[in-house]
Structures are given as C-alpha cells and as structure tokens.
Amino acid sequence: MGLFSTKSNETFPWVKISSIDQLNDVLLNAREKPALFFKHSTRCSISSMALNSFERYWKHDSDFCDLYFIDLLNYRDVSNEIAILTGVVHQSPQVIVVHQKEVLYDATHSSIDGRKIESILNQQ
C-alpha cells in the first residue's frame, strides 16, 4: 500500500450515500443517533490521507455513531445538498457530524480528528 492509497473501505463500516432521498432519511434518523458524513474525493491524495487517518484512529463501533461515506466524484449533488441543509460550506475532504438537527463538528483536510469527534459524541 502506497503513502496515498486507501485501504479497502469494505473493512470499515461505512454506509455509502448515493441519493438526496437517502441523505434526507439519514438526517431524519440523526435525530436519534449521531450521523457522521465523510465527503471524499477518490482522485485526491490529500483526501485519501485524511480518510486513512480517520479510519486508523476511529475506535468506536457503529452503535456509537452511524458512519456515512460520500464519493464526491459520483455524488456531488448529495454533497451540495448536505452543504445546503447543514449550512457548512462544501470542502473536500470533509467530515460533518449531525445530531438532533445540529452540526456538532465539521472539519476539513488535516483538521479531521476522529479522537476529537469521539470526545464530542461522548458528551451527548
């Protein structure tokens, strides 16, 4: 595995979002359980490094927070809709955590910190 390559997302419990309808359902469910969105550009080495780092340091299972993956190259409309609904300006890579209609965390690039996200969610 090279420095900028990504490991298989099949081993990480991502749920891939591919439509705005699916996104709306996820946001509705985020009233009960936090939802984490990882917006990833599959052609960007910085995005790959941020994804690898997040996956390496994230310690919680899917019962803690639902994890959603958005492939920006294929589903830019979904990414744009998240920006509209959350008020968080689109960037890539980007993580947005939503719970009970509130953005609890957002970060981009090397600022994405799984441990900080876990700390914030532990306070919920």
Image (cartoon, grey):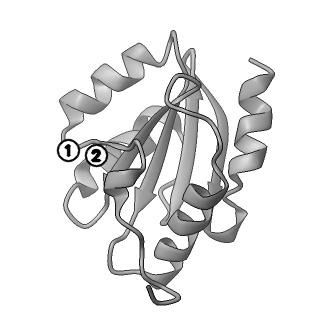
Find residue 10 and report its image quarter: bottom left
Find residue 13 and report its image quarter: top left
- Residue at image location 56% in from the left, 29% down from the top: 98
Furthest residue toward top: 32
Q: Earlier in the sequence, mark 1 or mark 2?
A: 1
Q: Quadrant of the N terminus?
A: bottom left
> Marks 2 and 1: in contact by CB < 8 Å?
yes
Three-letter residue code for mark 1: Ser
Q: Nearer the viewer, mark 1 or mark 2?
A: 1
Q: Residue 72: x and y, percent?
A: 31, 61
Q: Residue 49: x and y, percent?
A: 55, 75
Three-letter residue code for mark 2: Val
Q: Which mark is residue 38?
A: none
Above or below: residue 124 compared with residue 114: above
Above or below: residue 41 compared with residue 28: below
Q: In what element is the residue under mark 2?
A: helix
Q: Residue 112: x and y, percent?
A: 66, 58
Q: Residue 25: x and y, percent?
A: 29, 20
Above or below: residue 67 compared with residue 27: below
Q: CA distance from mark 1 to mark 2?
A: 7 Å
- In the image shown, does 40 or 11 lie closer to the viewer? 11
- Residue at image location 37% in from the left, 48% down from the top: 69
- In the image shown, does 25 or 69 lie closer to the viewer? 69
Q: Quadrant of the C terminus?
A: top right
Task: Residue under label 2, please give it.
Answer: 78
Determine if residue 73 is in view. yes
